[in-house]
Amino acid sequence: MTENATETVEVWEPWELVLTGAEVGNPFLDVDLRARLELGERVVEVGGFADGASRHLVRAVFDEPGGWTYRTTSNVAALDGIEGSVEVVAGERPGPVRVDGFHFRTADGARYRPVGTTAYAWIHQSDDLRAQTLETLASTPFTKLRMTVFPKWYPYNEQEPPRHAFPVAADGGWDLQRFDVSFFRALDDRVAELAALGVQADVILLHPYDRWGYARLDPLTEERYLRYVIRRLAAWPHVWWSLANGFDLMPGKTDADWERIAAIVAEEDPWGHLTSIHHCLRFYDQSRPWITHVSAQRIDRYRTAENVDAWREQWGKPVVVDECGYEGDIEHGWGNLTAQELVRRAWEGAVRGGYVGHGETYRSPDEVLWWSKGGRLRGDSAPRLAFLDEIVGSAPGGAIDPLPSEWDLPVGGVAGTFLLAYFGGGRSSFRTFVLPEGTWRAEVIDTWNMTVTAVPGEHAGSVRVDLPAREFMAVRLTAVGGAADGRAREATDSAGA
Amino acid sequence: MTENATETVEVWEPWELVLTGAEVGNPFLDVDLRARLELGERVVEVGGFADGASRHLVRAVFDEPGGWTYRTTSNVAALDGIEGSVEVVAGERPGPVRVDGFHFRTADGARYRPVGTTAYAWIHQSDDLRAQTLETLASTPFTKLRMTVFPKWYPYNEQEPPRHAFPVAADGGWDLQRFDVSFFRALDDRVAELAALGVQADVILLHPYDRWGYARLDPLTEERYLRYVIRRLAAWPHVWWSLANGFDLMPGKTDADWERIAAIVAEEDPWGHLTSIHHCLRFYDQSRPWITHVSAQRIDRYRTAENVDAWREQWGKPVVVDECGYEGDIEHGWGNLTAQELVRRAWEGAVRGGYVGHGETYRSPDEVLWWSKGGRLRGDSAPRLAFLDEIVGSAPGGAIDPLPSEWDLPVGGVAGTFLLAYFGGGRSSFRTFVLPEGTWRAEVIDTWNMTVTAVPGEHAGSVRVDLPAREFMAVRLTAVGGAADGRAREATDSAGA
């Protein structure tokens, strides 16, 4: 029994217990290691994992200040009964993102809005390319990144990754009894890099685009992998679990398999990270209690973001349209949208109370497409998505819900104080708005050119708003003196061209 | 009993029997007049109508050459037993449009494709404006015009028409026991003007946009009106019946009423003109046998023309999307489309084997909007709709049906010989087509700029087609030596920019 010195960490700061020196046959198979964390009556149980032949780790994070204690249990004597204490102090860390009705907040209560993008296989690229990806993320509005643990084999993704999750066995196949620790340490590093940028890591645990066998692991290996990766990553507050990208394309998996997988994830994650499951052709039953939010893909070539309000009603959960089609020019219909069209979809989803994500698939001689490999963005949608986020953020409470709308003009907002009407592809030259009670200010928003132009005066009863007869316009109506008023004006000033 | 001299008319040339001098109390109520037309074993029964106090007409048209005879029956002696003969000779008239599977042909067997537009109330406008409308129709590709019998009261349509269908009674209301013949003679003239232009008259018998009472006629008056207008117009081969515009907005009418109305129309129309019923919020049951083709309105702000193939399958009839939204800039979502969007919808419908119509609603200081009043077009869609019609017309047989397609690229055509793939809002930089058996030529079609560019060479197996990464592109694939080959090349030459 070893006693470590008391450490000090902040609330929501990842903490790691390193236990070295216990030599066992196969540390990945032969060691059971758990830790029990306690603060007064509170108990948190967490699993440990091998990080090398004689190196074992327990990772945890604390949601409450105080003098936490820990004690390990293990089938290996050298790892059993390790005790210690951790002084957890209040800090400024926002903590994990939690569901807040149809929206999100971080654990500290601050509003969080997903402005997501996708670079599935970015962690499997060269150092230079990954550095570019991080630079891009640092200079763009994205607050969430979808990424796979396993490498991707797919058009524009036909190369070997630098590392694999399993070592090679004597017969040339994978040694599925062990993990290649360097693969998972690299994953740790990538996740840490996103944490440093304040970008949520939407970690896709399984996906079908594979030629190495990751999509067809036998159930026992798959379970070991899941427990391993969850134990490694769960102490990071900014990690989300996406059970799969395209769950319904995974060979041989039934819904019962996904339920089993979801149970494993929940069992290994004491902190309740956001959890979703992404589909290709059919939604998984999004009413399942382990699904915290809907992670939607395009369900129709013409109409997807426009379903956000219906999906909210259907499942009573936040709707994140992670894959509505990507800005780009490749041959596939999922990756040949104009920036205008992607931004239009994002607005259609936003005024219905949802969050539509980004991806970019411009052809490039080097086959580096952001959607999968990361790198640099070449398109025009990202600044417009930032602008949209700013406009939504100007609502009181920083989030909007769908409000009663006429058939041809969806309106989102906060009833009584803040209305955001989006015209999409319609290009009217004017519109008359019947106003709720009170006095209102109106602004014309050009969602493409990112300008906000005030309509003169204050208005009661109704207001006729002249529009430039262009596509992609919106109108923001703000109750004078309402909670939204100050914030709306502030946003206007900064967003004005 | 009077015997008229033998007249000579061509097959499908409207013929009229004029009977004057029979003075009765109320010629609209007190006279029953019918004629029996015979050719050998064939008998056609047709109703007559009053065209003034002492003027009665029987109108007919003959679908077969030969020595036809007629004989009237009437409750008024002076109109009863009138006999005569009509020498019907072969001519060049195409005759009425008939359903041909999911498409149309005129009675002479020639392909007819609806390139429709809408000017609902054009007949109720000034002489000058109507002359403009006819000039516009003469110089645009439209082969069908939707028009109401009754005047329209609606935004941008807030004026009195020059004539009404009923005379004013002593109490200042309508005298519903009589018709104002000048109103219906003007209707005759307008229908004749369209015939002269070769434009099908899609005559809307009832509509809800009314302040004079036409939408709320009592059932007996309504029935008298229907019998009267059908008897007046049915001899024109180019007339179609649209029972209603927005049947479900008509006050107080049940489906049983519409069935009754449809039966009246069929009873008075011996020639089986095309008959449809247009909706606002819900389709009428389009499987009803009296409905010859689906006349569809936008059923969703985002996705309507894309349903054409499903509707064809559902009802087994041609689908004409008469109202998919209009090019314009008014405040309403049904009238604020860009030309690009309307043309996109037309292509989406076309490659699914349907026909999407046009309308235009640009704001104008004089409130003359083409969609209702006619006049001049200001938009950009009409030439593109002509181009689309030309491309569809280049298919063997002059019509295309939906063919098996990938999810992101609808393909219409004639299996084995002619394929037309439409990219819509997707703007890929290339696409590889797997070709059916045989050797094929490929052309890139820019549906907006109206150009056709040949891909060099002839291809078998597959062909990779480079595209300009712009929206609104199509690819035409033509089997070399197939039936379509010569026509396709011809169309290419004429359509090339």
Image (spheres, coloured by chain):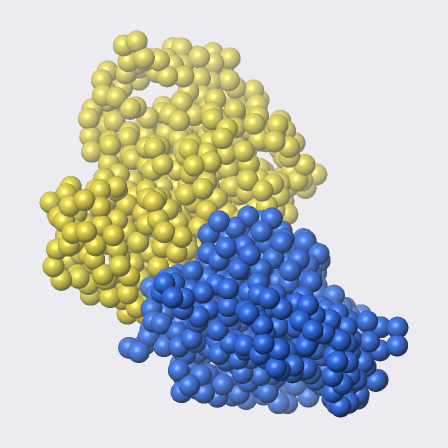
Chain colours: A yellow, B blue
Q: Nearer the viewer, residue B328 or B417?
A: B328
Q: Tell me: B90 left or right of B410.
A: right
Indicate whether B428 appears above or below A240: below
Q: Residue at x 44, y 12 (%)?
A: A73
- Choose top left, top right, bottom left or bottom right for residue B319: bottom right
Q: x and y percent of residue B314 in the render?
A: 67, 53
Q: Residue at x 34, y 33 (%)?
A: A101
Quadrant where the image shows the N terminus of chain B: bottom right
Question: Number of marks in the image?
Answer: 0
Q: Nearer the viewer, residue B51 or B355?
A: B51
Quick one: which residue is furthest to the right in this view?
Answer: B41
Q: x and y percent of residue B12 in the render?
A: 72, 82
Indicate whether B54 appears above or below A301: below
Q: x and y percent of residue B493 in the render?
A: 64, 89
Q: Residue at x 45, y 65 (%)?
A: B175
Quadrant where the image shows the C terminus of chain B: bottom right
Can residue A386 be seen? no
Can residue A353 be seen? yes
Q: Nearer the viewer, residue B252 or B425?
A: B252
